[in-house]
Image (cartoon, rainbow, N blue to C red):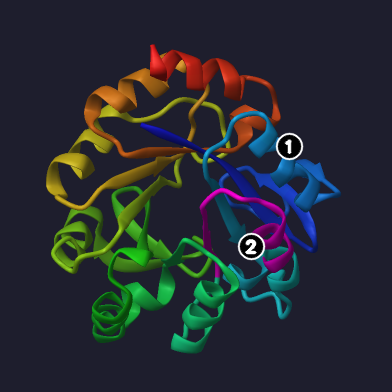
């Protein structure tokens, strides 16, 4: 199982939010490009970069910071947050993103998602963000009316690179994961599943690997020191 440190961008800073609430930034790092290079130096073989301002429709984006990160590191980077048009997908791929993560637009416009999957195949990921068993959109602020496993079934056969399942109920809380819920998503999908939400221990990472999760996104646990990246990578290799 791969481990991807998260670089979540808000107003040009690298932050970690509690439950996705933009008013609850528990971690704030002024130099996101420097943070990205530090994670790579610590052993990260890939990075997960999200433009929170774009996802939340704040009227600004962090695309300049995203491009700077892509230029600064030599590992694969998956990028998402407010990607809701074909030109936006093309721009990020051209800038060097290994994969582009689609969320709100993918949920609300299935035909567009099919077109992106047809054109770009494994370079497209879909965010499966759920609260209370229901898919949420627009920076996790709006319920979609679509059940979690129903949505997984809808997108699983499109030839996507991965599904990114975030359990919004525990995201950023360090409360641990819902093992049964994660297993239900992994079992329902043939597409590789990445997971984010509530992770706080090496034991949980080992459990995710046993469940068949393809990659784990590590945010709050890394930034607060609850999980050491080098130690975690060593544990998974062992």
Q: Residue 52 carries which label?
A: 2
- Identify the residue at horizontal 41%, vertical 14% (top origin): 203
Q: Which image quarter is the C terminus in?
A: top left
Magenta residue span: 67-81
Residue marked by disc 1 = 38
Horizontally, residue 140 falls left or right of residue 118, namely right
Q: Position of residue 58 (x, y in %)?
A: 69, 75
Horizontally, residue 110 falls left or right of residue 230, namely left
Q: Position of residue 233 (x, y in %)?
A: 49, 22
Q: Where is residue 165 in the image (x, y as percent from the top left)?
A: 35, 49
- Identify the residue at horizontal 45%, vertical 25% (top origin): 176
Picture layout, residue 199 above or below residue 170: above
Q: Magenta span has 29? A: no
Label 2 or label 1, whichever comes before in sequence order:
1
Q: Which image quarter is the N terminus in?
A: top left
Q: Can residue 227 be seen in this view?
A: no
Q: Is residue 70 visible?
A: yes
Name the one closer to the observer, 43 or 56: 43
Picture layout, residue 72 above or below residue 106: above
Circle 1: element type = helix
């Amino acid at each position: 199982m791969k481990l991807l440190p998260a670089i979540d961008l808000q107003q040009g800073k690298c932050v970690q939010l509690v439950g996705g609430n933009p008013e609850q930034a528990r971690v704030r790092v002024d130099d996101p490009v420097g943070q990205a290079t530090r994670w790579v130096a610590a052993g990260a073989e890939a990075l997960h970069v999200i433009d929170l301002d774009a996802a939340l429709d704040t009227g600004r984006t962090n695309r300049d910071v995203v491009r700077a990160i892509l230029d600064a590191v030599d590992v694969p980077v998956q990028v998402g947050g407010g990607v809701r048009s074909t030109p936006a997908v093309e721009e990020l791929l051209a800038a060097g993103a290994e994969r582009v993560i689609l969320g709100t637009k993918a949920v609300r416009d299935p035909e567009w998602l099919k077109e992106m999957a047809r054109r770009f195949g494994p370079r497209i990921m879909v965010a499966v963000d759920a609260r209370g068993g229901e898919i949420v959109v627009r920076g996790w602020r709006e319920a979609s009316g679509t059940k979690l496993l129903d949505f997984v079934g809808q997108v699983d056969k499109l030839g996507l690179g991965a599904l990114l399942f975030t359990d919004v109920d525990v995201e950023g809380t360090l409360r641990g994961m819902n093992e049964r819920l994660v297993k239900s998503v992994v079992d329902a999908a043939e597409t590789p599943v990445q997971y984010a939400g509530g992770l706080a221990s090496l034991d949980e990472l080992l459990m995710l690997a046993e469940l068949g999760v393809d990659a784990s996104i590590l945010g709050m646990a890394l930034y607060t020191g609850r999980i050491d990246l080098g130690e975690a990578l060593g544990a998974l290799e062992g």
